[in-house]
Image (spheres, grey):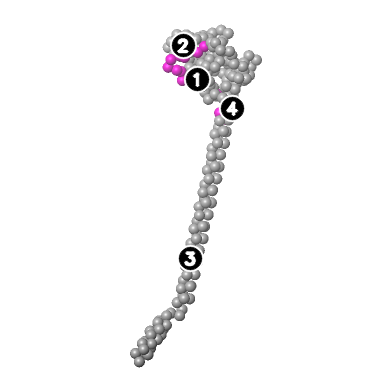
Amino acid sequence: MSDTNEMSREQELLEEFKAGLDKDGPVVLAQRVAELEADRDRASDAVATVQAERDALLERAETAEAERDAAIARAEKADAATRKVTAQVKKATAPAKPRKLGRMSSDRLSPEVLLDEIDDADDIEVAFSDGAREVPGIAPITVTGEAWKRHAFGVMLTEPVHLEGPQGGASTRIAGYALLLDGKQVAWCERSMPLPIAPGQRVTIADDILF
């Protein structure tokens, strides 16, 4: 009788267990899993979209930067070309101490070589010498642009040069002209006759500076 009673109790527990199960549970769980997977897929798609937009923005930024650099390069080239074409002669700052400038022992450069060196130089300067040193009180000039031309006897400065004699001093004279490229004398032009300049006197030199 006890065995029969025990079996009955097991059956009762089994029936209670079955009664407590949610018949719709597996379906609900499957739907929830599907929803979570859909959420995951949407999130993955959103991340992919953001990454694609980021990559597109980076590409556009790189393109814009390259275009900007190219525009700057073109502007600098155009500016350099404008400066080069426009011939200009300006008074430079006189050195504190007259430089040793005058006749050179080396061979004279050919016009072709001299024009190439002028074209390659960053700083082109013409100084005025007594034949041995820079004339005190007469400032050198800087030359920019297409200010040089071939001549039968060399390379000539095409622009006129305006000089003023030293103030409050004695008269001086110019025996010749020294051409300096990037601070180094490369050529010398001796005048047929020294040019005297009185204090404060204004003098114009044209078609006479020839290297």
Q: Which residue is drawn at 50% across and 54% down?
A: 51
Q: Is residue 171 above or below residue 23?
A: above
Q: According to the image, label 2 marks what residue?
A: 199
| Inter-mark Cα distance, 1 to 4 | 22 Å
Q: According to the image, label 3 marks what residue?
A: 39
Q: Is residue 100 magenta?
A: yes
| Inter-mark Cα distance, 1 to 2 | 28 Å
Q: Can residue 201 be seen in this view?
A: no
Dominant secondary structure of the residues highlighted in magenta in the image: loop
In the image, is 150 to the left or to the right of 66? right
| Inter-mark Cα distance, 2 to 3 | 94 Å
- For marks 1 and 2, the one nearer the N-term is 1
Q: Mark 2 or mark 4, which is nearer to you?
A: 4
Q: Is residue 14 visible?
A: yes
Residue 172 percent location from the top left of the image: 48, 9
Q: How many labels does the image show?
A: 4
Q: Which residue is drawn at 65% across and 15% down?
A: 152
Residue 168 percent location from the top left of the image: 42, 12
